[in-house]
Image (cartoon, coloured by chain):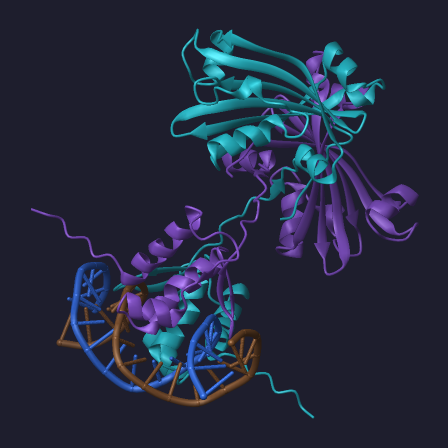
Chain colours: A cyan, B purple, C brown, D blue
Amino acid sequence: MESIVKVPRFLVIKQYLENHINTGNWPAGTRVPSENDLAETFSVSRMTARRALAELDRQGLLLRSPGSGSFVKKIDKKRPKIELVDVIEDLLAAGRYRCRVLSMDAIQSDSETASSMEIDIGENLFKATFLYLDLDKPCQLEHLYVNSSLVPAFMKQNYEKISPSSYIDWITGDCESDYLLNSVIASPGERRELALTGEDEQACIKLRRRIWMGGNIVSLSVTINPGQLYQLQSVI
Amino acid sequence: MESIVKVPRFLVIKQYLENHINTGNWPAGTRVPSENDLAETFSVSRMTARRALAELDRQGLLLRSPGSGSFVKKIDKKRPKIELVDVIEDLLAAGRYRCRVLSMDAIQSDSETASSMEIDIGENLFKATFLYLDLDKPCQLEHLYVNSSLVPAFMKQNYEKISPSSYIDWITGDCESDYLLNSVIASPGERRELALTGEDEQACIKLRRRIWMGGNIVSLSVTINPGQLYQLQSVI
DNA sequence: AAGTGGTCTAGACCACTTG
DNA sequence: AAGTGGTCTAGACCACTTG
């Protein structure tokens, strides 16, 4: 009773090429067999041979150019990446989300906020500070600046059921964001709000997120999390 | 003088499908036209229609199953990712890498290191502490545990030209790693080594990296960086 | 002029799920 | 039984780089 597994031919060819590349047998710059070569040596049609090469190209192992040939790429050092977990989203999903609005005002941008939001000084903004809780346990502080012309109804929302970020995301649709992460020591005020007592607990992760719409910044959020609670793990 | 740009037909079809999906016209779960449908409506061969669908499938927009059809996937919330920049690699590349070996010993694992390296208590390890400098400026501290049976020559290397991590990477080939990031306050000793004087400078980013080979941990590295210097940016 | 990869065709057989 | 996606064929034309 042998289990006969049908292996597609393009996979055989792909494996053949991948082995030569990964073992270092064909170092970077080596010209690999052409579609026609492979078609002949493996007795397949050109389209099948092509598929093996095309998939390796898509995987970033090859550099292909018409008229010239296919060449082994030099491995691009992939930098490890870490996933940013949105604690608030998790709390919302678990029904444990609570939000306390510490402040919420319409202001004019000063020089500092103007430069970080890439707008002129004196433009209208909303500035708010939120404390998020896991049920009754404080777990994140957020300073939020919102472009009031792009999200005019921001201050009229009720943030007991939805988070400010998810409201902005909903208004703007799915826009691009950039993130900046570093480590800070919580200020006395922040320590008080977050109920951080111990010496070591002062170490916090600060994450700045800016949401872009077209060339403009919709909002700038700075979240502060206790470093012990908020650990970030890689998935590659 | 019109510039006539030849647009591949599969791209036209792909765009057509993508538009319907992205505008929400075809919400998640919607069945999209089959290969045969598309081939007929766009007057192309089935292989060309297929390519449009296959590429969208690869992009994660579709769920395809033989006999059943192709369906719009519900968008998978892509968590933002942050790139971990290896400061040491950058220093090496710039010729500014300096390394001071603060300690290097052969030890037996105690209960704590045993559990974090997932080995038994009492196994042979190398334990070392390095201080890395940008020319003469301290910029990173590293506590490193190395499985001595997997990297036996670790202590015999000269780390003035290559970094310990790059040596291990070279020995093990390209293995999988996992990372864990959080925020800590530098201990008095660490502050001294890193020459951190100011109050705010105590906030550091701590990054644990474990290198896996097969099911075993080759090394466990804990690096400590001043939070001000070491900012992490998203590229998406 | 010969070879390369990029696109495309009109067929084919297959295992599979659907009505 | 009719339709689906997955694989594959043996051709074709094209713009391009190479000797």
In depth, the one of D9 and A106 nearer the eye is A106
The percent coordinates of residue A13 (x first, y second) are 47, 75
What count of labels does the image hold?
0
Q: Identify the residue shown where x is 57% and y is 39%.
A: B80
- Taking the image as shown, residue B124 lies to the left or right of residue A169, namely right
Place of residue A74 in the rendered image (x, y in percent of width and height, measured from the top left): 45, 54
Identity of the residue drawn at 57% across and 10% down:
A105
Q: Is residue A210 visible?
A: yes
Where is residue C18, by image quadrant?
Answer: bottom right
Q: Can you name the residue that lies furthest to the bottom here?
A: A1
**Of B36 and B97, which appears nearest the observer?**
B36
- In the displayed structure, A53 sits above or below B156; it is below
Give the vertical position of B137 relative to B88 (above or below): above
Residue farthest toward the left in the current orientation of the protein: B1
Q: Is residue B162 visible?
A: no
Residue A161 in picture, x, y percent from top left: 67, 30
Asked which quadrant contains residue B33, the reply is: bottom left
Q: Where's the N terminus of chain A, which quadrant?
A: bottom right
Look at 44% across and 58% down and name the residue there: B56
Q: Is residue B134 left or right of residue A122?
A: right
Taking the image as shown, residue A208 lies to the left or right of residue A46, namely right
* Residue A35 x, y percent position in the rendering: 35, 73
Q: Is residue C15 above or below residue B50?
A: below
Name the residue nearer the viewer: B122 or B50: B50
Above or below for B112 versus A172: below
Left or right position of A189 against A23: right
Residue shown at 65% from the left, 87% from the top: A3
